[in-house]
Image (cartoon, helix red, strand yellow):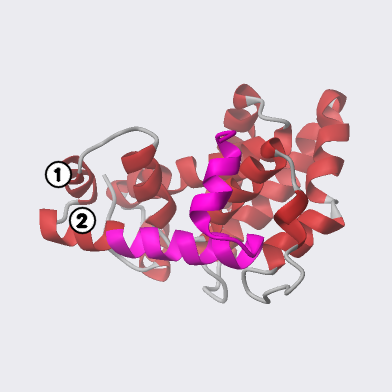
Amino acid sequence: MTLNITDRELVSAMLAGHEAAFQSFFDTYFPRIYRFAVPRLGGDAEAGKEVVQSTLVNAMRNLAGYRGEAALFSWLCQICRRQIVDYVRVNRRHAQILVAFDDSPELRAALESIEAPDEDGPAQHYDRQQTRKIVQSVLDRLPLRYGDILEWKYIEGHSVEEIGTRLGVTHTAAQSLLARARVAFREAVETVFGRTADEVLADMQGR
């Protein structure tokens, strides 16, 4: 169950000990942080689950330190990065993959171009695997719920009615949110890659 409240309100409710707030926090952010972590761990799902669990536990222990200056998701990503480094330090098998993904100047430039467009389109020459990673990162950078809604609809195959039920909103509201999520995704992908979203997704599928 997710609560329709702001980041600060959610944190305040958790600090006050409201059980529903903790459940909403977990339901909302576990899948989003998981999508953020797994590509940085070479696609290792089990490692991703372990890192995300550590991230959320660490975050809950330090909720009083959240000042609302950044989005809660951004704050959690910062914690997750540290947890990934700690995990890699203990489990050396992921070290090379982590460096290749996070320390690639081309990848950083592509992701940063969402906010500061790069006319040269640095991601245009990525192979299919790299393209998938960048598209997943775009999903993670979308506004709250957009990435989840797109995943529920197009990856898990849920209907608009089912998505509305998950979010606790009407069918019309779910349709509207899905439409806005699609627009945001297309704009972000096209800004990063310098090509249409259809072309990028076709490349990912090998067409």
Q: Which residues are magenta?
A: 179-207
With respect to residue 168, does 67 lie above or below? below
Query: Residue 189 occupies which quadrant of the picture?
Result: bottom right
Whether residue 136 is visible: yes
Residue type beneath disc 1: Glu
Whole-percent x, y for residue 68 in the image? 52, 73
Whole-percent x, y for residue 141 in the image? 55, 59
Residue at 77 percent across and 61 percent down: it is: 122
Q: Is residue 14 left or right of residue 76?
A: left
Label 1: which secondary element: helix
Whole-percent x, y for residue 65 in the image? 59, 65
Q: Which label is found at residue 14? A: none
Query: Residue 194 occupies which quadrant of the picture?
Result: bottom right
Label 2: which secondary element: helix
Q: Is residue 126 left or right of residue 24?
A: right
Q: Which label is found at residue 174? A: 2
Residue type beneath disc 2: Ala
Residue closer to the observer: 61 or 68: 68
Residue at 47 percent across and 61 percent down: it is: 186
Q: Is residue 85 left or right of residue 83?
A: right
Residue at 81 percent across and 39 percent down: it is: 98
Whether residue 57 is visible: no
With respect to residue 7, does 36 lie above or below? above
**Mark found first going from the N terminus, 1 or 2:** 1
**Could you give the CA–CA distance between mark 1 and mark 2, rounded to whole angstroms?**
8 Å
Q: Is residue 188 magenta?
A: yes
Residue labelled with disc 1: 161
Q: Is residue 10 magenta?
A: no
Q: Label 2 near label 1: C-beta < 8 Å?
A: yes
Residue closer to the observer: 46 or 118: 118
Magenta span: chief secondary structure: helix
Query: Callout 1: few (<14), some (14-19), or many (20+) C-alpha neighbours within 10 Å?
Result: some
